[in-house]
Amino acid sequence: MFRWAGWFTFFNAGLLIAIISRYFQFTGSIEGTLPSIYAATILIGHSFLLAFGICFLVLFPVILIWPNRRLVWTIGVLAAILGIAVLLLDYVVYSQFRVHLNKVMLDLVIGGGKEIFDLAWQNYLIALICVIGVFVLQALIAGFVWVFIIKRTRRMAGPVVVMVGLIFLAAGHMIHAWADANYYSPVTAMGRHFPLYYPLTAKRLLQKYGWVDLAKSRTQSKLRINSVSVKTLQYPIKPLAFATPKKELNVLFITIDSWRFDMLNKAVTPHLHQFVSQHPTWRFKNHLSGGNGTRIGIFSLFYGLSGVHWDAMSSEQIGPVLVHEFINRKYQMGVFASAKLTMPPFNRTVFNDIKNLRSFSTGSSVWERDKVHLPTGRNG
């Protein structure tokens, strides 16, 4: 029964390869040897992981508890149908909204009814035919594996297949870890398009053993990105246009986690209140944050975009137009954070275009890391 489960999962991994390969239409053109190799490892290794993950979580426990062939076959076929159906649904959702299936989207699909998704009867008919087709296919695979694979193949064939799958899986994660540490966006920009894909990152480990220089890699990545004209994102859609002011002003952003707008008063933040009272400032009272967390809140503040674009901007290392314009106008940029800028990776998004960016602040406590003097001159 264990051998049957393994080979049944192997053939379903082949079906997942056919489905997941459709996600490559969203990655843009894949150019170069390393991105091509990485694409192959994602396709094979990730399909292998998804298929055998379900096998280990569902089929193996059933075989250990009650190794009845009819029961195991039934659960295996139903699990395969459910997994393929969810993956196909994710593909439909991602092709429309560029967001993978999550709880919010699943609630809309299942509980939204006709108020959210008004589908014609033809759509339901097609879905029913697909489910029936997948059921018949899974039943055929189950029988084929039992009759022609289990009884006619050597026992060592299974472990060899598993070993090959693990090699592809490990190779993909190792390539991504290297690409992430070297800010190599042709590789890192690919993973966000695939469902349930969480690639390995190991910047600190690679730097600790001297296998990568993060500062040098970041500089080289900027040159590489600037030389590439093809991106999967069109940002900005149009060039930034505005009237040039007679006097260019100093610009200062003070951002504090969980800081409510009405807490800027004498009692809670006396020094900031005094600063605002004594200097000409603009108060944007109608600004709405894109989210209730640090990552999305800062992202929406600087980009003026929804947080759904975070992964795209991070993987392709595209900074906001606002910061880019400050740099073009020769502003002296200073970024002083009490928390590291690599988690969340603001060094790859909001502050990506800033040279000599200090990603870490020294100090054992928050106030020591906050106590940093701004350089003199005009600052952005």
Image (spheres, rainbow, N blue to C red):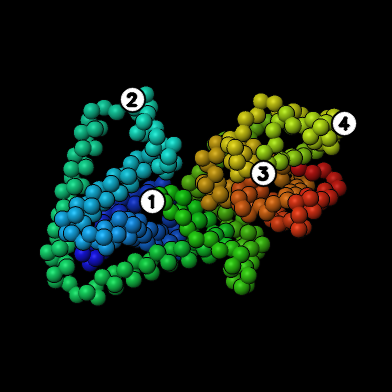
Of labels 1 and 3, the one closer to you: 1
**Residue visible at 83% across and 35% down?**
270
Q: Identify the secondary structure beneath mark 1.
A: helix
- Residue 260, relative to residue 73: is it above or below? above
The percent position of residue 249, horizontal first and vertical second, equals 80, 35
Tell me if mark 2 has few (under 14), some (14-19) or many (20+) residues whose alpha carbon lies within 10 angstroms of its own. Answer: few
Lower sequence index among marks 3 and 2: 2
Of labels 1 and 2, the one closer to you: 2
Lower sequence index among marks 4 and 2: 2
Tell me if mark 1 has few (under 14), some (14-19) or many (20+) residues whose alpha carbon lies within 10 angstroms of its own. Answer: some
- Residue 298, relative to residue 79: is it above or below? above
Between marks 1 and 4, how big is the CA–CA gap?
Answer: 55 Å
Q: Identify the secondary structure beneath mark 3.
A: helix
Report the amino acid beneath label 4. Gln
The picture quadrant where one finds residue 267 is top right
Between marks 1 and 2, how big is the CA–CA gap?
Answer: 31 Å
**Residue corresponding to mark 2:** 114
| Numbered badge on residue 324 | 3
Of labels 3 and 2, the one closer to you: 2
Report the amino acid beneath label 2. Lys
Q: Is residue 187 left or right of residue 329?
A: left
Between marks 3 and 2, how big is the CA–CA gap?
Answer: 44 Å
Lower sequence index among marks 1 and 4: 1
| Quadrant of the rendering where the N terminus is positioned | bottom left
5 vs 105, nearest the viewer? 5
Report the amino acid beneath label 1. Phe
The percent position of residue 146, horizontal first and vertical second, equals 15, 63
53 vs 358, nearest the viewer? 53
Between marks 3 and 4, how big is the CA–CA gap?
Answer: 29 Å
The percent position of residue 138, horizontal first and vertical second, equals 19, 52
